[in-house]
């Protein structure tokens, strides 16, 4: 059950920043030798690729609209990474089936990714330019702290990740409503403007 809890937390974090999750788990395996972290994640080539991709995402995730384009690309990548980590974590436990670990990791990653992508669209519609940097930096700190905490306290971390996921889904629901309302207002304004510009029939 500890592996399942760690899988859920890592999956949620992967949906926000998959490469940082791989880095944190890999570094933890290297410096801490934690039994619950698979040795595959601590391999130098894995850490190197994760570090390179995280550096790219670190920049892309803080630029308005570029972050949303990156989220579209990551719609497949983040759940796959979450599922892959889940399979690796499940493989180290005789009480968990690999398929269950993969499903849990991929599902929680897909859920948090959906929340992230949706809220970023809402943020990008805001005229305030520093929101992306603030939100992205906060996400990085939360992912790093939660995954590191989950290694030693998997049950508590899973509860925190579940709470974040639930809050995120509620926020996303409200964000979608605001976006749709704003779009309807914009469309109405645009239609009225076009109607005024059209010459009246003689």
Image (cartoon, rainbow, N blue to C red):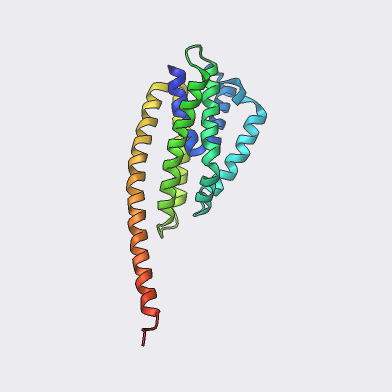
Q: In this view, does 193 lie above or below 186?
A: below
Q: Locate residue 93, reporting x and y percent.
A: 51, 14
Q: Is residue 46 left or right of residue 13?
A: right
Residue 31 lies left or right of residue 173; in this view the side is: right
Decide: is 130 above or below 85: below
Q: Residue at x 41, y 47 (%)?
A: 119
Work out which residue is located at the far right of the displayed protein and give it. 45
- Across and down, in percent, residue 24 comes to 54, 30
Quadrant of the rendering where the C terminus is positioned: bottom left
Q: Where is residue 32 in the image (x, y as percent from the top left)?
A: 55, 21
Position of 181 relative to 105 (above/below): below
Task: Identify the residue at image location x=46%, y=36%.
Answer: 110
The residue sitting at 43% across, 22% down in the picture is 5
On the question of residue 148 being in view, the answer is no
Can you name the residue that lies furthest to the top here? 94
Quadrant of the drawing holding the N terminus: top left
Q: Can residue 85 be seen in this view?
A: yes
Given residues 66 and 185, the one toward you in this image is 185
Q: Residue furthest bottom?
A: 202
Q: Residue at x 37, y 65 (%)?
A: 187
Residue 86 x/y as whole percent:
51, 25
**Image quadrant in which you'd find residue 138:** top left
Q: In this view, does 92 lie above or below 126?
A: above
Image mark count: 0
Quadrant in the rendering for residue 159: top left
């Amino acid at each position: 059950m500890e592996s399942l809890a760690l899988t859920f937390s890592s999956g949620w974090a992967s949906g926000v920043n998959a490469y940082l999750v791989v880095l944190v788990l890999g570094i933890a395996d290297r410096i801490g030798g934690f039994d619950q972290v698979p040795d595959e994640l601590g391999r130098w080539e894995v850490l190197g690729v994760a570090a390179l991709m995280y550096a790219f995402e670190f920049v892309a995730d803080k630029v308005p609209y570029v972050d949303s384009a990156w989220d579209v690309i990551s719609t497949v990548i983040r759940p796959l990474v979450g599922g892959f980590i889940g399979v690796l974590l499940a493989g180290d436990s005789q009480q968990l089936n690999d398929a269950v670990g993969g499903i849990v990791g991929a599902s929680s990653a897909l859920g948090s990714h959906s929340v992230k992508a949706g809220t970023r669209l809402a943020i990008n519609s805001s005229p305030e330019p520093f929101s992306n940097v603030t939100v992205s930096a906060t996400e990085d700190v939360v992912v790093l702290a939660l995954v590191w905490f989950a290694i030693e306290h998997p049950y508590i971390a899973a509860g925190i990740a579940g709470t974040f996921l639930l809050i995120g889904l509620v926020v996303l629901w409200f964000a979608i409503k605001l976006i749709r309302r704003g779009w309807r207002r914009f469309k109405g304004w645009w239609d009225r403007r076009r109607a005024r510009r059209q010459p009246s029939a003689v």
